[in-house]
Amino acid sequence: MANPNPGDAAIIMKIKAKMEKALPFVTDECCIYRVPHEIRKLKEDAYTPKVVSIGPFHHRDPNLQKMEGQKTIFFKEFIERTETKDLESFVSCVQKLELKVRGCYSDDIKLSEEEHVMVILVDCCFILEFLLKFHFHQWPKHDFLSPWLTTCGNDLLLIENQVPFFVLDKLYNLAFPSTSNPSLLTLTRYILPDGISSGNRDGLSLTNVGRIAHFTDLTRKLLLLSSDLSSECSREAQVTQLYSATQLREAGVKFEVNKDSNCLLDLQLSGHTLRIPFIRVVDSTEVVWRNLLAFEQCHCMDKAYLADYAFVIDFLINTDKDVDSLIKNGIIENWLGDSIAVAKMFNGLGVNIVTPDFNEKYYCILKGLNDFCKKPWNRKVATLKRDYCNTPWKTVASIAGIFLLILTVVQTVFSILQVVL
């Protein structure tokens, strides 16, 4: 064997050194992600905080620096609110968790340990004070943040704008070890979006929700917990299409509001009636759903139940006529003012979202609807009802016309029989 070239040996050593420094893209603790480029590029501002940065990803965003002073004020007020008022104990708590917290982020955090501790501590205390002010109705009229409360609450749900929930929980318990303050989970109701079952949310504890990664994860968990979708539900089904709401209605499918459930995910098919829970579409609806879907793509694609729901609604809504049909049936309440905008929103949610499998429950619903639409008789009956029986007067007129036609036929038959006989 030829002697190795000295140049080759140097390259090999560099490659080995590089291999030793190689780290996995994410760790088992990772739960806070940068939104993948192919998803983020579709609507950048849906994933970018508008008012307040939380955590290291957007810490130095120049557009959010105005809030840094307000966060410091809230931090100070929170420490003063605590039972101990001992700043050192809070710093020490976060210092002990710093390495674990760093592992929760998908990107390599460029902040030093000291900087990272300060960011996490101030941001966590800001969030806790923010929630407590909501709970105790302690917003002063001159407060800088008052006009931005809704936007700030929405920022706390963005997947890139999170701190680990376990840090919030540790600091909250450290601050109030013996008082009768509400649980931290109860406080989160003030920032959770529409569509979370209030009946379930108010009585939830950390035990039946399970391990919470952060607020985005909590929103998703509460949706699933309050739905009739089971975590054990098979996800081996494949779906290729579903007719739109207009096409389904023309084939005889009826649409009703599912009043038996408060959860958006609880779709039900009974005969040829599709029951869909009420959906209120507001300005923040798209932002919340885009971040929930992005989190599923990064963290739990094998249980992408929210993506399943988004795809079903996307199938149902192709145009503004489909939106108008669902509005007419009381399923959608449109606060955007434009049915085209609602259609565009739902059609955009699933773009670049990957769902290798589909849950069995939704698959059975879609298959039932498609099978119903494929039967020509159902479409003919639906056309007859639509064209001749869509109002009481038309129904009466149609029945009268049929009755007269029958009488005419009978009269003709008798006339023929008299001639023949």
Image: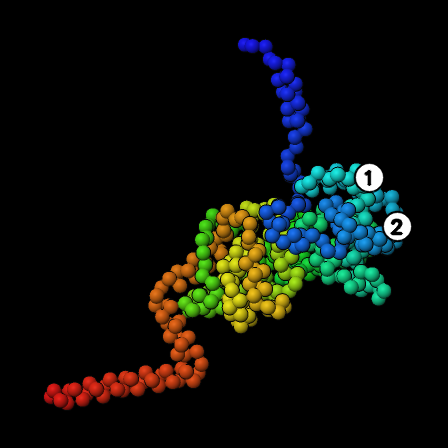
Residue 346, image x, y percentages: 56, 60
Q: Residue at x 51, y 68 (%)?
A: 321
Residue denoted by label 2: 85
Q: Nearer the viewer, residue 246 or 116?
A: 246
Q: Nearer the viewer, residue 186 or 37?
A: 37
Residue 226 appearing in the image: yes
Q: Position of residue 359 (x, y in %)?
A: 50, 52
Quadrant containing the N terminus in the rendered view:
top right
Apparent side of residue 257 relative to residue 11 in the rendered image (left or right): left
| Front disc: 2 or 1 | 1
* Residue at 80% in and 54% down: 67
Residue positioned 32% across, 83% down in the render: 402
Amino acid marked by disc 2: Lys
Front residue of this view, candidates 236 and 202: 236
x then y, percent, for residue 325:
51, 70
Q: Is residue 71 visible?
A: no
Q: Give the residue type that dot 1 points to.
A: Glu
Q: Which mark is residue 114?
A: 1
User: Position of 165 compared to 334: left or right?
Assistant: right
